[in-house]
Amino acid sequence: MTYTKLLLIDDDEEDLEIFLSALKKIDGQITCFTESNARLALQKLITRQIATDIIFVDLNMPVMTGQEFLLEIKKEDHLTDIPVVIFSTSAHAPTIRLTKELGAKDFITKPDKYSDLVKILQTFLK
């Protein structure tokens, strides 16, 4: 499936900018909504203020973690089919396993190199 509308939830402004830059390099036609607060993003999804094909969410955030977001989004009938990808600095195997058990489509450990991020995102978007 080709995704054209994305939602990125991350409280790190620099990570948001790098992600958006990588998306633009891949395909300038992709729309990406961003939110720094998972609880606010969830509310916007529930009330249909945001419509998206896929969600990338950071794991470690204040207010609501990526795991808590996964638990809550799966309670909403109209949101359960939207793939959620954890996008985190963590590479902890038990954490990765748990997020997949909670319903994450995949888990991406944030790469150190920009070119690696572009390659990783291309696998999800093309």
Image (cartoon, rainbow, N blue to C red):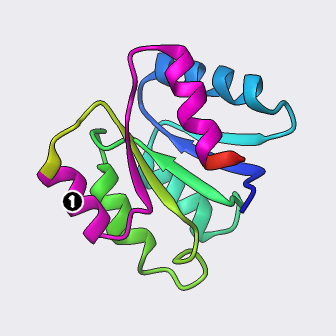
Q: Give the residues in magenta.
A: 94-123
Q: Position of residue 68 (x, y in %)?
A: 29, 60
Q: Is residue 91 above or below residue 112?
A: below
Q: Position of residue 13 (x, y in %)?
A: 49, 20
**Could you say whether the residue bearing mark 1 is in a helix, strand or loop?**
helix
Q: Is residue 38 above or below residue 32?
A: below
> What type is the residue that disc 1 sits on?
Arg
Residue that appears at 26% across and 70% down: 101
The magenta stretch spans residue 3: no
The magenta stretch spans residue 101: yes
Q: Position of residue 125 (x, y in %)?
A: 68, 47
Residue that appears at 20% across and 62% down: 98
- The dominant secondary structure in magenta is helix
Q: Position of residue 108 (x, y in %)?
A: 39, 41
Residue that appears at 69% across and 67% down: 48
* Residue 45 sits in quarter: bottom right
Judging by the rendered image, the residue that carries numbered circle 1 is: 97
Q: Is residue 120 above or below residue 73?
A: above
